[in-house]
Amino acid sequence: MNKLMLLPALAFISENDWSQESFKDNYLEIMINAFKEIDNNENLSLIWSNKLEEILWTEPRYKPWGDLNVRNSLVPIFYKFFVKNVDFISHENVQSTSSPNLEHTNTEILDEYYSISNHLILEEIEFALFNPNYSIQFETECNQTYSPICCCSNFDILKLQLKPFLFNGSIEESKAKLTYVISLYLKKNGLIKNNTYCLSSAFMRKVQTLSDLNIIELIDRLSLRISYNGQQARECIILQDEFITTNGINEFRMRITNRPTSKRVHYVINDNVLEFLNYYGVGEHDKRL
C-alpha cells in the first residue's frame, strides 16, 4: 500500500488543541520525522486535493500553518515535502457522513475527505488512513485518541460510510457496489471466492433498510458462503446452512446470527450460481423456522 491520507484532525489542528504546549511540541517532532520517512521511501505518497490546499491557506488558518511562531521554520519543510510526495486527487463532491475515524469540527473539511475516500474506493485504489504517531497518543477535542500508524484496507475505510456508498443510485448500481464491497472483504480476510453469485432486487431493498453494523455482519456471512462449497457450508456451525422447501420451491437457508436473534438469508442455486433472495431480521418469520 503506497497511498496515505493524513487524518483531518492532524492535518487541520484546532486552536484549543494547539494551545497545549505538550501537544504542540510532540506533534511537530513526530510529523517532521514521519514526513522525512515518507520522503525517503519512493513507494509512499500522501493524498491531497486542491480544496484541502485552499482550506490550508485560507484565513483563519488552522494550526500549525497559521502559527507565526513556527510558520517560518515549518512551512518551507512541509512545502518541499508536498512538492515531492503529494498526489493531488480530482473527484466529484459527495456529502459527508459522520464516522468514528474521520472527525473534525469543520464540516467542509469532512466533506472533502469523504469525497476523496469515496473516489479512491470507486476507482479501486488502495490507500490507508495515516497517523504518524509512533511514540505518544494525541487526544483532540473530538475526543479521539490516536494510536500508532493506522493502515486500513479499503474495506476498513468503506465501513465508515457504508450506506451512502451503497445506496446513492439505482438498485442495479447498489448490487454492483455490494458485490465490490464483498470482494474487498474477501481480499482483506484472505478468503477465496469459490462460487459465482448474484443478488436479487428484493434482497437489496431489504439490505437498504439495515444499519451499517448489520450490513457488515451480513457481508461477513455472505463472504463465508461464497468461499465455501456446499458441504463446507452445511458443516459450518456459524452458517448452519440447510436445505428447505418453501411453498413447493427448493431453497437454502443460512444463518447471519444464531439464536436468540436468528437473522437469516434465503438463497437458491441455479446452474451453479448462488442467488441471494431475501434477508430476515430479528422477529421476522420465514417459512419452517
Image (spheres, rainbow, N blue to C red):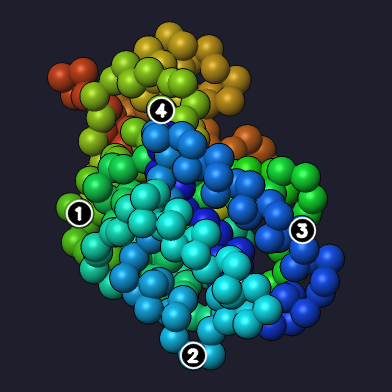
Q: Earlier in the sequence, mark 2 or mark 4?
A: 2
Picture disc at residue 215: none
The reply to whether dot 3 and dot 4 touch (C-beta < 8 Å) is no
Query: Image point 45% across, 54% down: which residue?
Result: 81
Label 2 – label 3 distance at C-alpha: 25 Å
Q: Earlier in the sequence, mark 1 or mark 3?
A: 3
Q: Nearer the viewer, mark 2 or mark 1?
A: 2
Query: Image point 50% across, 42% down: which residue?
Result: 38
Based on the displayed image, in which of its 4 quarters is residue 198 positioned? top left
Picture disc at residue 59: 2
SS at circle 2? loop
Q: Earlier in the sequence, mark 2 or mark 1?
A: 2
Label 2 – label 4 distance at C-alpha: 43 Å
Query: Image point 24% across, 24% down: which residue?
Result: 196
Q: Nearer the viewer, mark 1 or mark 3?
A: 3
Residue 150 percent location from the top left of the image: 60, 44
Label 1 – label 4 distance at C-alpha: 21 Å
The residue where tag 4 is placed is: 187
